[in-house]
C-alpha cells in the first residue's frame, strides 16, 4: 500500500513527487510512456513567466508568482539551467497601449516585482533588434527561461534518490475506490494507494474518468514553434512577447538556456491530443508574427519545428481540486500556461490539499535536497576538461559535434537515477542531437552506446516512445526477407 | 533511334543509338561512350557494389564490388549470394570474396581492408 | 609529438588527406592530421558505390578504394595522425605568431597544439528536416540520406522497408538504388526544383534502372504517424515552389530519406574569425585557398560543396602546397593587390572569391555553380566595364554539376577592377 501514487511523470507529477520525497512516505510515480517528461513538458515555450497575465484572484495568478519566486533556489539546488532574463511585452501602436497598462495593473495586483512600462525607444535600448514599430513595452524583470524537461528530470531524479519509486510504461487502465483508498490497475500489476494525485497532463480528464466523470472539459490546444540555430541565439536577450490578442496569447521570441532562439507558438484547438504535427499555415503565421517583433530574424537558421499540446480546459484556471465523492483523490488538471512556471508552487499547494485529507507531512531528517547533474563538458574550461578526461577518458570522446556532448555524459545519462532508454531520452538528458544537425551524425553513435550499455540489440533501440523504431532489420543475414 | 544518357562517367553525355544501323552511337564524347551505347541496348551490364558480413574485424560489414560489370538482370541474384557470405577479418583490399560470381566471370572483391578488432 | 607543428590539418577525409600529402611532398616534415572518426577517409568510407576517381586515377573506384589510395600515399610519409580526436577551437596567432588548436580525445585528453599553418578540411553536413521546415508529425523514420547510408553500409542495418526520398541530390539517388538492392521498396523520389540536384548518370542507374519514379517540381506537404512514419503526402509545386492544392498524392511508407543539400561545416572557421561567404556557407578564400586569416587555409567541402571528390583532391593539394609555401616563408604581402571575382547572371558563387593579382600563377582555377539549367551557353568573363576578357563554351549547364574554368594569370594581373563571371545562353537555346 502506497501512501501516495502520482499518475504522470511530467513536470507537475515530478514536482509533487519531489515535494513528497521530503516526508517519510511511501510514494510512487506511474508514467504511461517509456520515459518521463515526454508530454507537454517537453514541448512548450520553456518560459518562467513573471505572472502579470493571469487574472488576479485566480489560482494561476497566485501559483505563477509563487512558482516564479521559488524557481531560482530550486534550480540552484537541482543543478538545472535557469536564467532570470526578464521579459518584454510589446505594443505596436496606440490601440495596444491600454493592453500594456492593463497587464501592468494585473501584475501589480498579483504581486509581480519590478514591473515597468517603457517607451518604444527604451525597449529598443534594452533590445536593439526590436522593430522600429514598437511603441511601448512592459518590462518584467522576474521572468526567466529554463530547461523544462531538465527541470522535470532533476525533480524526479532527486525524488527517486530520496526514496520515491518510479514506474514507467505503466499506464493506469482502471481505478477502483476501496473505501477511502484506491486500487489502480496497470499492465505492470495493481497498485494500492491511500491518496492519488492525478497529474496526467492532457489526459488528466481521461484518468479522472476511470474513477468518476470530471466536471471540467479538456480542450487540447496546439502551439507550433521554430527552434533556431545558435547563430540566431543572440537576437534578443529577454523573452519578447506580443500583446495577447484575439489570435491567442501572441508569438514570443526567446533565447533558450541552451543558447538557441525559440520562436512561437500559435494557438489552435485540435481534436486529437496526440497530433503533434506542424502545418505550413501555422508556421507561416508564427514566422510573420515573430518578424513583426524582431524584423532581422533569420528563420532560415531553423533547426527544428515542433508543436506542443496545451491542456486547456473550460475553467480558464488550473483545475486543481479534491474529488467530492473520493476526497483522497486530487486532480492537478488543466495545467496549461503558466503551468511550468507554477510547478513548484502547485506541488506545495497539492501537498497542503493532501494534508487536509489526513496525509502526514512531517519532514524526514535524511532528505537530501541537492541533485548534481552530470558534468556538462561544453560548459567547462580547458583545465576542468583535462581533469575530467583524466578521471574518465570517455569524457574525451565527443559524440555530438554540434553540442559537444561526450560519451561520458551519455553513459552517465544511461545510468542515472531516472535512466534514459531512448535516443531522444539521451537528448533530453544531455543535449546530444539538439544541435543543428539534429542527430544526423550522432544518432547512430548514441544508438550504439545505448545498445552497448543496456545490453540490447541495435534494432531494439527506440527513437523515443514505444513504437518509434529506428532500424527495420539487420542486413546480410543470409535469409530471405520475410 | 534510341536516346540514352551515358553513365560511364559523371559527364552524362546524351547518346543516340541507331538500332537499325549496327547500333551506331552518336553524341558520345569518348570511345567508352560508344561501347556503352552499343551494349546498353543489347546486353546491359552494371558493376554491383554492396556489402558482405565480416566477423572479428573493426567493422561488421565489408564493402565489395564486382571486378567487372555483370548482366543487369543478375543484380538481385548476385545480392542473394552476397547476403549469405561471411568472411573473417583480416581482409586485404582487393581480396577475392566470391570467385566467378554466378558464372559471370566477374569476382566479388573487397573494396577495402579490414583489420582484426 | 612534434609540437609546435608546421601544419595541422583538421579533418582526415579526402580533403585533409590530399592537403597533408601535398604539404609533405613540398617539404614540410612536422604535419599532424586531427580526425574525429576512428579511421581516415571521412565520408568516403560509407560511399561504397563506384564512380570516384575517373579524373584523378583514370579508373572507376568505390569510395573506400579512393580513400585507400590516399591513405596509402600518406603511409609513405611521416605525417602524424590523431584519430578519435575532436577539434574544439582554433585560436589564430597574431601577426604571424603560432596558431593554437584545441583538441580533445579519450587517449590524449585535452591538448592545446601549436602550429605555423592550419588547413581546415572538416567537410560538410546534411541539411535536415528543420532546415526546410517540412510540415507534418515528427515520428521516427525520417533520416538524412547520409545517416541511412552509414547505418546500411558501415553498420549493416536497414532503416526501413518502404521509402520515399525527398530531394534528388546524389546521396539520395545512390541510396534509392542501395535500399532497393537490399530489398526495400523505394516508392518515389521527390524533387522541389524542375530539375534534378544530382548527376544525370545517377538518375539513370539509380532510379530508371529500378523503375523508381522521379517527381520533379513536387514536394512533401505532410507526414503522418504518431510513432513511426506511416504516410507522406506529396504535392506538385508551382513556379513559386509553393504547393498547388488538389495535386496531392499519398504514399504509405515507413521511411523518409532527405537528400536536400549539404552545408559546409564551419563552426570552427567562424569562431576563429575568418571572413565567410554567405553564398557558399564557407570561408572566403584566395586563389591559394588561404582564408582571410594568414596561415589558415581551407579546402574541400568545407569551402564549397563539390560534386566530385576528384576536384576536392585537386583543390586540397593546392591548399596543402600553399600551406607549405607559407610555412617556408612565402607569405602574401599584407596589402597585396586583389581582384574580386563577381557573380554575374546565372552564377551562384565562385571559389576563389578573390585573387591576389601578383600571386596568380600561369592560371587561376575557378570553381563555380550555375543557378539554372541551360542549353548551349557561354561562360563569359568580363571586366568592370563589361568588356569581354575571355569566354568558355558549354553544351549544357546544370546546378547539380560544379563548373570550373582556368583563367589565364595574365588576365587577372591585367584587371584593373573586379572580374565578372556570367552565363550567356545562346539565343533560342533554352533549357531542354
Image: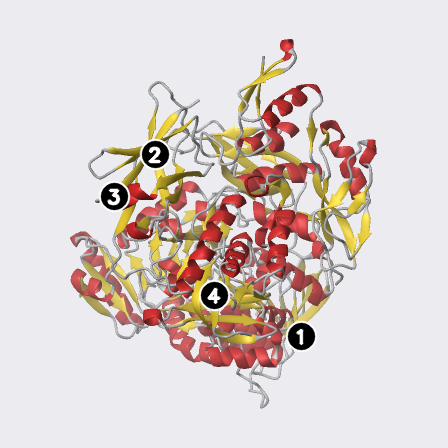
Given residues A123 and C86, the one toward you in this image is C86
Q: Cα distance, mark 3 to mark 2?
A: 25 Å
Q: Name the residue carrying label 4.
A: C7
Q: Identify the residue shown where x is 53% and y is 54%.
A: C18
Q: Name the residue carrying label 2.
A: C346
Q: Would residue A163 be visible to someone looking at this image?
A: yes
Q: Are marks 3 and 4 on the same chain?
A: yes
Q: Are marks 3 and 2 in contact (CB under 8 Å)?
A: no
Residue A141 position, x and y percent, is 29, 72
Residue sticking out furthest to the bottom: A365
Q: Cα distance, mark 2 to mark 4?
A: 38 Å
Under tag 3, what secondary structure? helix
Q: Cα distance, mark 1 to mark 2?
A: 73 Å
Q: Name the residue carrying label 1.
A: A2
Q: Identify the residue shown where x is 28% and y is 71%.
A: A109
Under tag 1, what secondary structure? strand
Looking at the rendered image, the quarter that the N terminus of chain B falls into is top right
Q: Name the residue carrying label 3.
A: C414
Amino acid at each position: 500500500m502506497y501512501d501516495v501514487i502520482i499518475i504522470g511523470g511530467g513536470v507537475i507529477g515530478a514536482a509533487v513527487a519531489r515535494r513528497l520525497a521530503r516526508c517519510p512516505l511511501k510514494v510512487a510515480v506511474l508514467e504511461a510512456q517509456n520515459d518521463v517528461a515526454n508530454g507537454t513538458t517537453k514541448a512548450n515555450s520553456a518560459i518562467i513567466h513573471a505572472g502579470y497575465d493571469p487574472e488576479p484572484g485566480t489560482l494561476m495568478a497566485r501559483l505563477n508568482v509563487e512558482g516564479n519566486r521559488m524557481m531560482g533556489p530550486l534550480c540552484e539546488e537541482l543543478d538545472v539551467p535557469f536564467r532570470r532574463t526578464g521579459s518584454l511585452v510589446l505594443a505596436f501602436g496606440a490601440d495596444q497601449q491600454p493592453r500594456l497598462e492593463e497587464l501592468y495593473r494585473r501584475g501589480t495586483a498579483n504581486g509581480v516585482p519590478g514591473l515597468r512600462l517603457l517607451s518604444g525607444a527604451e525597449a529598443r535600448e534594452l533590445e536593439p533588434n526590436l522593430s522600429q514599430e514598437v511603441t511601448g513595452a512592459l518590462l518584467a524583470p522576474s521572468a526567466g527561461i529554463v530547461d523544462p524537461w531538465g527541470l522535470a528530470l532533476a525533480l524526479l531524479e532527486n525524488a527517486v534518490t530520496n526514496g520515491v519509486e518510479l514506474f514507467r510504461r505503466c499506464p493506469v487502465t482502471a481505478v477502483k475506490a476501496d473505501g477511502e483508498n484506491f486500487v489502480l490497475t496497470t499492465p505492470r500489476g495493481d497498485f494500492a494507494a491511500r491518496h492519488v494525485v492525478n497529474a496526467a497532463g492532457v489526459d488528466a480528464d481521461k484518468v479522472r474518468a476511470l474513477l468518476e466523470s470530471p466536471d471540467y472539459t479538456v480542450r487540447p490546444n496546439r502551439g507550433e514553434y521554430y527552434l533556431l540555430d545558435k547563430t540566431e541565439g543572440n537576437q534578443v536577450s529577454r523573452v519578447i512577447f506580443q500583446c495577447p490578442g484575439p489570435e491567442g496569447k501572441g508569438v514570443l521570441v526567446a533565447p533558450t538556456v541552451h543558447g538557441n532562439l525559440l520562436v512561437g507558438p500559435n494557438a489552435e484547438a485540435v481534436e486529437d491530443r496526440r497530433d503533434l504535427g506542424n502545418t505550413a499555415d501555422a508556421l507561416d503565421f508564427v514566422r510573420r508574427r515573430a518578424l513583426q517583433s524582431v524584423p532581422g530574424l533569420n528563420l532560415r537558421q531553423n533547426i527544428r519545428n515542433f508543436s506542443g499540446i496545451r491542456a486547456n480546459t473550460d475553467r480558464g484556471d488550473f483545475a486543481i481540486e479534491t474529488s467530492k465523492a473520493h476526497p483522497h483523490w486530487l486532480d492537478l488538471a488543466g495545467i496549461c500556461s503558466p503551468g511550468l512556471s507554477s510547478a513548484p508552487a502547485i506541488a506545495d499547494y497539492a501537498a497542503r490539499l493532501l494534508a487536509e485529507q489526513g496525509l502526514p507531512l512531517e519532514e524526514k531528517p535524511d532528505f537530501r535536497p541537492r541533485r548534481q547533474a552530470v558534468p556538462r563538458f561544453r560548459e567547462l574550461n580547458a583545465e576542468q576538461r583535462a581533469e575530467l578526461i583524466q578521471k574518465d577518458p570517455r569524457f574525451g570522446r565527443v559524440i555530438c559535434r554540434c553540442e559537444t556532448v561526450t560519451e561520458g555524459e551519455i553513459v552517465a545519462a544511461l545510468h542515472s537515477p531516472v535512466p534514459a532508454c531512448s535516443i531522444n531520452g539521451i537528448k533530453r538528458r544531455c543535449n546530444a542531437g539538439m544541435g543543428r544537425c539534429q542527430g544526423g551524425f550522432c544518432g547512430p553513435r548514441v544508438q550504439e552506446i545505448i545498445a552497448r550499455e543496456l545490453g540490447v540489440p541495435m534494432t531494439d533501440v527506440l527513437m523515443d516512445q514505444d513504437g518509434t523504431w529506428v532500424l527495420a532489420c539487420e542486413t546480410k543475414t543470409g535469409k530471405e526477407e520475410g | 533511334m534510341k536516346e540514352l544518357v551515358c553513365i560511364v562517367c559523371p559527364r552524362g553525355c546524351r547518346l543516340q543509338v541507331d538500332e537499325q544501323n549496327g547500333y551506331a552511337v552518336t553524341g558520345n564524347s569518348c570511345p567508352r561512350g560508344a561501347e556503352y551505347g552499343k551494349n546498353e541496348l543489347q546486353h546491359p551490364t552494371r558493376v554491383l557494389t554492396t556489402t558482405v558480413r565480416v566477423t572479428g574485424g573493426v567493422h561488421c560489414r565489408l564493402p565489395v564490388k564486382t571486378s567487372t560489370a555483370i548482366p543487369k538482370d543478375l543484380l538481385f541474384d548476385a545480392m542473394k549470394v552476397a547476403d549469405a557470405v561471411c568472411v573473417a577479418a583480416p581482409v586485404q583490399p582487393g581480396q577475392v570474396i566470391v570467385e566467378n560470381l554466378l558464372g559471370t566471370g566477374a569476382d566479388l572483391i573487397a573494396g577495402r581492408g579490414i583489420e582484426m578488432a | 609529438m612534434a609540437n609546435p607543428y608546421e601544419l595541422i590539418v583538421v579533418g582526415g577525409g579526402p580533403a585533409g588527406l590530399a592537403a597533408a600529402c601535398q604539404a609533405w611532398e613540398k617539404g614540410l616534415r612536422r604535419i599532424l592530421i586531427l580526425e574525429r572518426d576512428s579511421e581516415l577517409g571521412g565520408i568516403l568510407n560509407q560511399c561504397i558505390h563506384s564512380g570516384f576517381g575517373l579524373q584523378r586515377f583514370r579508373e572507376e573506384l568505390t569510395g573506400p578504394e579512393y580513400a585507400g589510395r590516399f591513405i596509402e600515399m600518406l603511409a609513405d610519409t611521416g605525417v602524424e595522425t590523431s584519430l578519435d580526436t575532436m577539434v574544439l577551437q582554433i585560436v589564430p596567432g597574431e601577426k604571424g605568431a603560432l596558431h593554437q588548436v584545441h583538441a580533445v580525445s579519450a587517449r590524449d585528453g585535452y591538448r592545446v597544439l601549436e602550429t605555423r599553418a592550419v588547413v581546415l578540411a572538416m567537410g560538410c553536413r546534411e541539411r535536415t528536416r528543420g532546415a526546410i521546415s517540412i510540415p507534418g508529425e515528427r515520428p521516427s523514420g525520417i533520416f538524412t540520406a547520409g545517416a541511412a547510408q552509414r547505418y546500411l553500409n558501415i553498420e549493416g542495418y536497414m532503416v526501413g522497408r518502404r521509402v520515399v526520398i525527398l530531394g534528388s541530390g546524389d546521396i539520395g539517388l545512390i541510396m534509392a538504388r542501395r535500399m532497393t538492392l537490399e530489398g526495400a521498396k523505394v516508392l518515389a523520389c521527390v524533387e522541389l526544383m524542375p530539375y534534378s540536384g544530382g548527376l544525370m548518370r545517377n538518375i539513370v542507374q539509380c532510379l530508371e534502372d529500378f523503375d523508381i519514379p522521379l517527381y520533379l517540381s513536387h514536394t512533401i506537404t505532410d507526414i503522418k504517424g504518431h510513432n513511426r512514419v506511416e504516410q507522406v503526402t506529396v504535392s506538385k509545386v508551382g513556379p513559386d515552389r509553393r504547393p498547388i492544392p488538389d495535386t496531392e498524392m499519398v504514399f504509405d511508407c515507413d521511411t523518409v530519406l532527405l537528400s536536400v543539400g549539404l552545408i559546409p561545416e564551419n563552426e570552427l572557421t567562424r569562431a576563429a574569425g575568418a571572413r565567410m561567404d554567405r553564398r557558399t556557407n564557407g570561408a572566403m578564400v584566395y586563389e591559394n585557398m588561404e582564408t582571410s586569416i594568414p596561415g589558415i587555409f581551407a579546402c574541400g567541402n568545407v569551402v564549397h560543396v563539390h560534386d566530385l571528390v576528384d576536384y576536392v583532391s585537386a583543390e586540397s593539394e593546392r591548399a596543402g602546397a600553399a600551406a607549405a609555401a607559407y610555412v617556408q616563408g612565402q607569405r602574401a604581402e599584407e596589402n597585396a593587390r586583389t581582384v574580386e571575382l563577381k557573380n554575374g547572371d546565372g552564377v551562384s558563387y565562385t571559389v576563389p572569391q578573390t585573387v591576389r593579382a601578383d600571386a596568380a600563377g600561369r592560371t587561376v582555377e575557378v570553381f563555380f555553380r550555375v543557378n539554372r539549367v541551360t542549353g548551349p551557353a557561354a561562360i563569359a568573363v568580363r571586366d568592370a566595364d563589361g568588356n569581354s576578357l575571355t569566354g568558355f563554351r558549354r553544351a549544357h549547364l546544370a546546378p547539380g554539376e560544379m563548373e570550373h574554368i582556368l583563367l589565364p594569370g595574365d588576365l587577372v594581373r591585367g584587371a584593373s577592377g573586379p572580374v565578372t563571371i556570367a552565363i550567356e545562353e545562346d539565343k533560342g537555346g533554352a533549357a531542354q
